[in-house]
Amino acid sequence: MFGIDRIGGAPADENLGHAAGPELLPNVTGVILAGGQSRRMGSNKAVLPYGGVPLIERIYRQMSELFVETVVVTNTPELYPFLPCPKVKDQYPGMGPLAGIHAALNYSRTRYIAVVACDMPWISTRLIRELAGFRDGSDVILPEGDHGLEPLHAIYSKECIPFIEESLNADRRRIVSFFDRVKVQVMTLDQTSQIEPSLRAFRNINTVQEYQQSLENQVIGSTR
């Protein structure tokens, strides 16, 4: 009943997927996780300049193309006064991205959330639309990249909350730690590559060198 399945067939929501236009996705809240300590960067990477705006603002603008509401999960909301959106604090501070997903699910007024990180400048709005099209009946929908599952470019349902809490209370902080207790659908690497051939949507920025390289390779505009 529970565990990981591969995505097959057409999206359950016929208004989404390949036929989707620029309309906002219903019953899904956008979430940007901004709780990392940026140790390797040496400064808050969320506010690094990127394309003329702070990196997190670039990501917020992309997410706003998809969702009625986008929220930022952060324990330092005072750092982001320029973002016109709710800022949500962790209920399990210091426990990483899984705690951020938990906080967002508890806050969300929709059944589903779409989660990305604040250091991913090339998120794929098209891929998020495709993943959202398979959400009915699933608790987690996520793509597979060239390094495995990509839980920070994924869809989560409120049904995950008690299982995430079990993991956090047991000090299991890996995002995938609760996947065996919920229904998970995975978009295979082949399927993901058809939508996002470069797979760059999953690349994040952790170091000064990666930031400088990303600026050199920067392409203005979101990945579609």
Image (cartoon, helix red, strand yellow):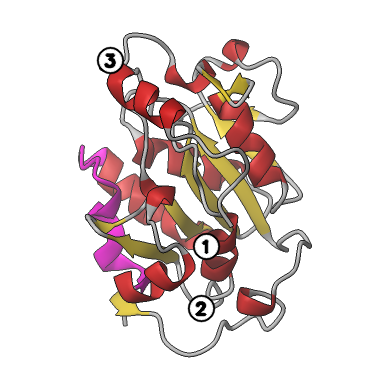
**Residue underneath mark 1:** 127
Image coords of residue 142 (percent x, y): 40, 63
Q: What element carries label 1?
A: helix
Task: Work out whether 162 lies above or below 1.
Answer: above
Q: What residue type is labelled 3?
A: Arg
- Identify which residue is drawn at 35% across, 27% down: 213
Quarter of the image for residue 43 reads top left
Question: Along the line of sight, which residue is nearer the eye, 128 or 207?
Answer: 207
- Which span of residues is magenta-colored? 169-187
**Residue underneath mark 3:** 39
Image coords of residue 94 (percent x, y): 33, 23
- Disc 1 crowd rating (10 Å Cα; few below 14, some 14-19, many 20+) is many
Q: Is residue 130 left or right of residue 147?
A: right
Question: Along the line of sight, which residue is nearer the eye, 108 or 64?
Answer: 64
- Disc 3 crowd rating (10 Å Cα; few below 14, some 14-19, many 20+) is few
Question: Along the line of sight, which residue is nearer the eye, 211 or 46?
Answer: 211
**Residue underneath mark 2:** 137
Quarter of the image for residue 3 reads bottom left
Q: What residue type is labelled 1?
A: Leu
Does residue 139 belong to the magenta stretch?
no
Quarter of the image for residue 8 reads bottom left
- Identify which residue is drawn at 51% across, 24% down: 74
